[in-house]
Amino acid sequence: MLASPRSSDRLKGARLLAKSKDFSKLPELRQYERQEADSWVRHTLARVIGKWQASTAIPDSDESWISPKAESELEDIRSQAIQNVTQTLLHEMHPLLADISAAVAAEISLPFAGSRSAAALARTTEFLQVIHRLYEASASANNEEFDLSSLILEVIHYCGYTEEQVLATRLDPVITVGDPGLLRIALQNVIKNAVEASEKTEVKVLVNCAVTDSYSWVVVLDEGVGFPEGHERAWEPGITSKSKETHFGWGLPITKRAVASLGGTIKLVPREHRGISCEIRWPLVEIVGKETT
């Protein structure tokens, strides 16, 4: 099953291996993990490998004992929980907001458009859009080959930034493997933060990228105001130094989740003189087969 072109079959095969005790296949399993493109399958294989290694090292261990879960398994659990909760929330809230909007418009005597009720409902709808982006950022990675420099230019153009605001330093093809959708979510938030931080200094944001033998990376450099007070909590949902009337404070949590779904890491570091360096890095994987569902 692990050689199947269908990720659902490979995931089923990985889960079946978790019940097996044929530890002689451990080297073969490591090879499958290195080549696996789907993040859910890769994380499941990593858990099986960890379990087999522990069983080999301590063959007489009592399986009734509760053992701490590996970080990769915890990430799977977090992502699945986020997707389940956000999907339910979106499903229930959208029709409810539509009913409220219609009822308020019919019952109040003042013009509904431009009223405080209309503004409050619009703000709630915007928040549901934020939740929807969190849902998308928690999806399992669908890895494919793509041009990293072209994706960066696409994000800059989509967000409407000028060359005076954001400059991509690489225009040559930079071919990598990963999930461009998840990376797009992360880059939109990171570049937006960098541009907003640079509004007072008016120094353009630089975006660079590269691919090594083992990983790909994107770095966003700004010369803005730097870390605000209380930045230690910047990764928490709802935390923002900006106006809560126009920002929800979910940009960095969504970015972090998208990068985690990609199988990568994100790091914010203050630059020597002023501004922040944001680096996104993810490991290279081999695509073993295209989805045929």
Image (spheres, helix red, strand yellow):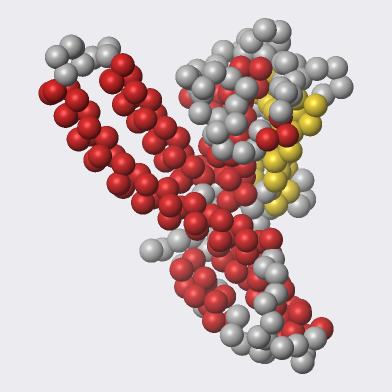
Q: Is residue 115 above or below residue 277?
A: above
Q: Position of residue 107 (x, y in %)?
A: 13, 23
In the rendered view, does 92 fall on the left or right side of 261? Answer: left
Q: Is residue 205 above or below residue 69?
A: above
Identify the image quadrant of the C terminus: bottom left
Please name whichever residue, 62 or 129, is drawn nearer the observer in this view of the structure.
Answer: 62
Residue at position x 53%, y 37% in the image: 185
- Residue 226 quadrant: top right
Residue at position x 41%, y 63% in the image: 292
Q: Residue furthest bottom?
A: 60
In the rendered view, does 66 fall on the left or right side of 243? Answer: right
Residue 274 visible from this viewpoint: yes
Q: Residue furthest right?
A: 272
Q: Position of residue 128 (x, y in %)?
A: 39, 36
Residue at position x 71%, y 28% in the image: 230
Disc count in the image?
Answer: 0
Q: Is residue 169 above or below residue 267?
A: above
Residue at position x 28%, y 20% in the image: 118
Residue 169 visible from this viewpoint: no
Q: Position of residue 10 (x, y in %)?
A: 52, 72
In the rendered view, does 235 fall on the left or right side of 293? Answer: right
Please name whichever residue, 38 or 239, is drawn nearer the observer in this view of the structure.
Answer: 239
- Residue 228 quadrant: top right
Q: Is residue 51 above or below residue 268?
A: below
In the rendered view, does 115 fall on the left or right side of 66? Answer: left
